[in-house]
């Protein structure tokens, strides 16, 4: 018996509303509304809140991004000098959104992040959706280029970033040069539809991963983007998504 459960008359009963998780014989219930508890290797999306760098990641305490845990543009490792600290404001400022990986978790639960891979770094044009971390399914990868023409980063911390799929990966930028060109209307419509589909899935308490989001997107196509947020339409498209997922498992 794990967290979120208790025994009454020899029956396992959930003490919180949430998703059941089984690891071998251990049964836990993960609360639907919860703060993010960091684990090493998690992919997160966060917002810089203070210099040197505190990051809001939906956890109880601000996360930390150390200078030594970042690459210079082009993948070069950081030098730890006073000039280097001043130069960092050219790359990151308060309010910027970043993608990163959890490097370590401190004893008080605070999280230390790193952006040493070129796939992490500053986020440019896109839309942020905040959901409960318990609804983001853990997968081998949390970066997905969807066939509908947009990409998503499913942060383990419940911050989801939807953005236009880049035509080419700019490996030289080191993750800190962002494209601020205007986004075409067709791309904005796809991103808006994906955003509303994610809201629908969350409202109906369905786990978020690349397949569930794509199935929901396809189920929403007969409807106008704004209509997806109507309760009866949400229920209809999520029911279709759930059925397709069951067929896939079956």
Image (cartoon, rainbow, N blue to C red):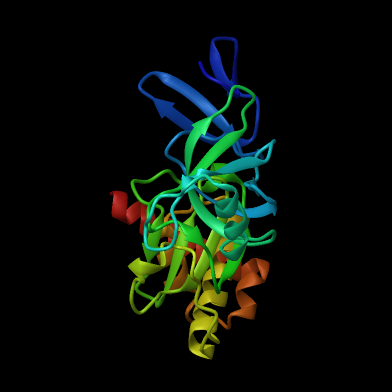
Q: From the viewer's perspective, is residue 63 above or below residue 160?
A: above
Quarter occupied by residue 175: bottom left
Q: Determine if residue 204 is in view.
A: no
Q: Nearer the viewer, residue 71 or 193?
A: 71
Q: From the viewer's perspective, is residue 10 above or below residue 58?
A: above
Q: Position of residue 145 (x, y in %)?
A: 37, 67
Q: Nearer the viewer, residue 181 or 140?
A: 181
Tally the marks. Answer: 0
Name, please, the residue furthest toward the bottom.
185
Name, please, the residue furthest toward the top.
9
Q: From the viewer's perspective, is residue 25 above or below residue 97?
A: above
Q: Position of residue 17 (x, y in %)?
A: 64, 35
Q: Nearer the viewer, residue 47 or 141?
A: 47
Residue at image coords 45%, 34%: 40
Q: Position of residue 114 (x, y in %)?
A: 48, 45
Q: Position of residue 62 (x, y in %)?
A: 67, 41
Q: Determine if residue 9 is in view.
A: yes
Residue at image coords 51%, 44%: 80
């Amino acid at each position: 018996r794990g967290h979120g459960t208790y025994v009454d008359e020899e029956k396992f009963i959930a003490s919180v509303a949430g998703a059941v998780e089984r690891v071998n014989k251990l049964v836990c219930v993960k609360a639907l509304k919860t703060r993010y508890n960091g684990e090493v290797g998690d992919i997160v999306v966060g917002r810089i809140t203070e210099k040197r760098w505190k990051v809001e990641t939906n956890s109880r305490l601000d996360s930390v991004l150390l200078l030594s845990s970042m690459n210079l543009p082009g993948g070069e490792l950081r030098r730890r000098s006073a000039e280097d600290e001043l130069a960092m404001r050219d790359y990151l400022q308060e309010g910027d959104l970043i993608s990163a990986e959890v490097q370590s978790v401190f004893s008080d639960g605070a999280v230390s992040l790193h952006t040493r891979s070129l796939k992490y770094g500053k986020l440019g044009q896109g839309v942020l959706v905040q959901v409960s971390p318990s609804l983001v399914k853990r997968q081998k990868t949390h970066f997905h280029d969807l066939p509908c023409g947009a990409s998503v980063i499913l942060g383990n911390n419940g911050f989801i970033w939807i953005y236009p799929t880049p035509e080419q990966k700019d490996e030289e930028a080191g993750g800190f040069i962002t494209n601020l060109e205007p986004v075409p209307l067709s791309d904005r419509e796809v991103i808006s539809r994906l955003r509303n589909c994610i809201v629908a899935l969350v409202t109906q308490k369905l786990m978020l991963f690349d397949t569930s989001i794509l199935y929901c997107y396809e189920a929403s196509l007969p409807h106008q983007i704004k209509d997806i947020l109507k309760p009866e339409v949400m229920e209809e498209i999520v029911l279709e998504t759930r059925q397709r997922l069951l067929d896939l498992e079956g």
